[in-house]
Amino acid sequence: MKVIISGASGLVGSALIPALLGEGHQVTRLVRRNPSAGQVNGVSTLLWDPESSTLDERSLNHEVFVHLSGETVAERWREEKKRRIRDSRVKSTALIAERLSRLVAAPPRALICASAIGFYGDRGSEVLHEESAPGSGFLAEVCREWEAAAEPARRAGIRVVHLRLGVVLSPEGGALAKMLTPFKLGVGGKVGGGDQWMSWIALDDVIEIIKFVIARDDVRGPVNVVSPHPVTNGEFTDTLGRVLSRPTFIPLPAFGARFAFGEMADALLLSSARVVPARLTEAGFAFAHPQLEEALRHLLR
């Protein structure tokens, strides 16, 4: 199968490419700088630029498009940063969907787009599934616009899947990588009260879910990419400390998180989203790492 990937250098994309190549698929990366001639390690490259709407649909003759690109949200938000977060998701998805909708003769089988559980906002202990209503706040608004931007592809009859990603755990990047140093030094601890729910997922399972979704023509719409066993921040803290054999007695109080990270702290560190993968469970997906402690021991060897 021919698969084209945006955001291929990110945490998920860089793990997805070798997984697809290992199964014999042809992979093309969308890049923002001038692509290399020919193939590098079996991967072709194409140039695109969402800001200038540069993307030639004539080069998009692939069976599946996996769209993973987007500005990182794990930094202090100023107005320019928030603009980049929104535009990098909404504009890029709109460009891809519009270009793919023009491929009348040979449209792709599927457009698989990253989204996030930020769609649900801060919901306390409410159990959230794919049919749950959207939440409020900046990230929830971005996620709604992000998913809506794929509408041209959907109207053209292309199967569209929105991967509502939870906290992706990997020592190579993302939240876990940032936590490791303070926790290994014994200065890690819960954030705020620690009772906010964290919906997490091991990177290995993310890759298997994407492969599963590519293969299953009956899966479409939003898909919660999270473990079936979310935990509270306090439980996550205790478990990581136990796996690393380190104490976890130094909390980051809510006011400290807000002082250090501003608005982002409330949206990412202090908000609560108890999300379950209802659609994946119904479709029969088997998680390799459904429990947090086993997942952390696997990831951290």
Image (cartoon, rainbow, N blue to C red):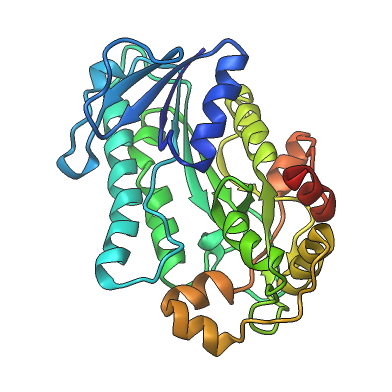
The residue lying at 43 percent from left, 33 percent from top is 8
Residue located farthest toward the left when viewing the structure as drawn: 52
* Relative height, residue 208 to residue 224 (above, below): above
Tell which residue pokes out farthest to the bottom in this image.
255
**In the image, 78: left or right of 189?**
left
Who's the residue at 52% across and 62% down the image? 118
**Residue 238: x, y in percent?**
80, 69
Res. 105 image quadrant: top left
The answer to whether 75 is drawn above or below residue 131 in the figure is below
Residue 38 at x, y percent in the picture: 31, 10
Q: Relative to 5, does residue 174 appear above or below in the rendering?
A: below
Image quadrant assignment for residue 47 = top left
Residue 125 versus residue 220: which sits nearer the camera?
125
- Location of the C terminus by quadrant is top right
Along the horizontal axis of the image, is 18 left or right of 156?
right
> Residue at coordinates 44% horizontally, 65% vertically from top-left?
139
Residue at image location 65% in from the left, 35% down from the top: 209
Q: Position of residue 256 (x, y in %)?
A: 53, 86
Is 245 drawn above or below residue 65 in the view shown? below
